[in-house]
Image (cartoon, rainbow, N blue to C red):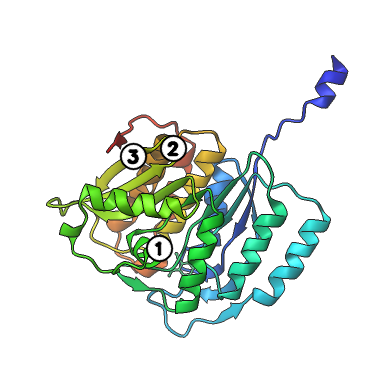
């Protein structure tokens, strides 16, 4: 019996390699990824892609330190430690060359029972972020081929597919959304999630949609559209998604939880008069991640 117990090695805290930038101020990337994953009982192991004084949205003159040349040395050390990651989760990349580094990271640390989550951080609201080059966009289309789960927003989905990034609301018919989801899944990922989809004739709603390729099922969760842009909400969304999937939740429950949490975070922040560029008041709502899901609103579509 004692022998049998000694053979059993449960993994009480799953590990996620978190490949994102560290922006010192403004609540995005690692400053939201780490607290969200930790609160969900996941160990976040950061591999920084760049270090910035602030994120790049609505801040000028930020200081940007590209970490490309350091990443390989970090990875070599991690390889020598033979670390096993239950998830590899990448987000904002600081240069096009980093895509190759992340690809070889995934190859080197691949193991069974692991999820590779790629959040192809490129832009929002029809525009690319300040530091995103055309090269990085085309390289990102290659990185998504190695992922199990991708979580572009609607602008990033358009960029990955070579579609116009600023389509009118009326363009987002169900067949068109399904076509985008399927085309992205054909690139490789088993699960494709697109956030911030406009809902035709419902300006007060926004929707998050997902395609589960193995089971050929489409899911959606609708939420109230709040007319304010907060940076970092995409990073929070994908972090909750990653945490939920690592905790064994189903795709629609994970979607629901992520949408609910981001909505709570935006609602907790929207009523306050403070600069939006500082991101949502994550610290005020983080504990909600420990609460059980009570109401779900996901549906097949
Ligand atoms: O939240 C996405 C993101 C991540 N990292 C940096 C950013 C942004 C969005 O503006 O600037 C550095």
Q: Residue at x 31, y 64 (%)?
A: 229
The answer to whether one can see residue 171 in this image is yes
Q: Is mark 2 within 8 Å of ligand 1?
A: no
- The answer to whether residue 91 is above or below residue 149 is below
Q: Residue at x 55, y 36 (%)?
A: 247
- Mark 2 neighbour density, 10 Å: few (under 14) some (14–19) many (20 or more): some
Asked whether 21 or 276 is in front, the reply is 21
- Mark 1 neighbour density, 10 Å: few (under 14) some (14–19) many (20 or more): many
Check if mark 3's residue and mark 2's residue have beta carbons within 8 Å: yes
Mark 2–mark 1 Cα distance, whole angstroms, equals: 27 Å
Left of 96 or right of it: where is 225? Answer: left
User: Mark 2 = which residue?
Assistant: 251
- Mark 3 neighbour density, 10 Å: few (under 14) some (14–19) many (20 or more): some
Q: Residue at x 39, y 37 (%)?
A: 216
Quadrant (top left, top right, bottom left, bottom right) of the N terminus:
top right
Q: Residue furthest left?
A: 201
Q: What secondary structure is found at the residue carrying circle 3?
A: strand
User: Mark 1 = which residue?
Assistant: 279
Q: Earlier in the sequence, mark 2 or mark 1?
A: 2
Q: What secondary structure is found at the residue carrying circle 2?
A: helix
Left of 180 or right of it: where is 42? Answer: right
Q: Position of residue 260 (x, y in %)?
A: 36, 43
Q: Position of residue 217 (x, y in %)?
A: 37, 37
Check if mark 2's residue and mark 1's residue have beta carbons within 8 Å: no
User: Mark 3 = which residue?
Assistant: 219
Q: Earlier in the sequence, mark 3 or mark 2?
A: 3
The answer to whether one can see residue 131 in this image is no
């Amino acid at each position: 019996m004692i022998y049998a117990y000694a053979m059993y090695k449960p993994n009480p805290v799953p590990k996620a390699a978190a490949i994102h930038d560290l922006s010192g101020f403004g609540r995005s990337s690692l400053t939201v990824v780490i607290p969200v994953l930790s609160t969900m009982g996941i160990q976040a192991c950061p591999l920084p892609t760049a270090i910035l004084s602030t994120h790049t949205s609505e801040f000028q003159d930020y200081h940007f330190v590209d970490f490309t040349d350091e990443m390989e040395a970090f990875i070599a050390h991690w390889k020598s430690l033979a670390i096993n990651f239950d998830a590899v989760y990448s987000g904002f990349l600081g240069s096009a060359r980093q895509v190759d580094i992340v690809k070889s990271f995934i190859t080197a640390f691949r193991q069974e029972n692991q999820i590779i989550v790629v959040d192809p951080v490129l832009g929002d609201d029809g525009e690319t972020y300040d530091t995103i080059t055309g090269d990085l966009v085309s390289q990102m289309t290659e990185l998504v081929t190695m992922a199990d789960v991708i979580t572009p927003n609607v602008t990033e989905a358009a960029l990955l597919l070579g579609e116009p990034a600023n389509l009118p609301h009326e363009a987002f018919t169900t067949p068109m959304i399904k076509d985008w989801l399927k085309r992205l899944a054909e690139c490789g990922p088993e699960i494709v999630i697109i956030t911030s989809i406009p809902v035709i004739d419902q300006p007060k709603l926004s929707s998050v949609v997902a395609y589960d390729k193995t089971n050929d099922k489409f899911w959606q969760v609708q939420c109230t559209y709040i007319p304010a842009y907060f940076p970092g909400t995409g990073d929070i969304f994908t972090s909750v998604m990653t945490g939920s999937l690592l905790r064994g939740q189903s795709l629609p429950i994970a979607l629901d939880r992520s949408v609910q949490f981001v909505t709570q975070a935006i609602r907790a922040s929207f009523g306050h008069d403070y600069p939006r560029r500082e991101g949502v008041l994550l610290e005020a709502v983080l504990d909600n991640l420990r609460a059980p899901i009570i109401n779900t609103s996901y549906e097949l579509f």
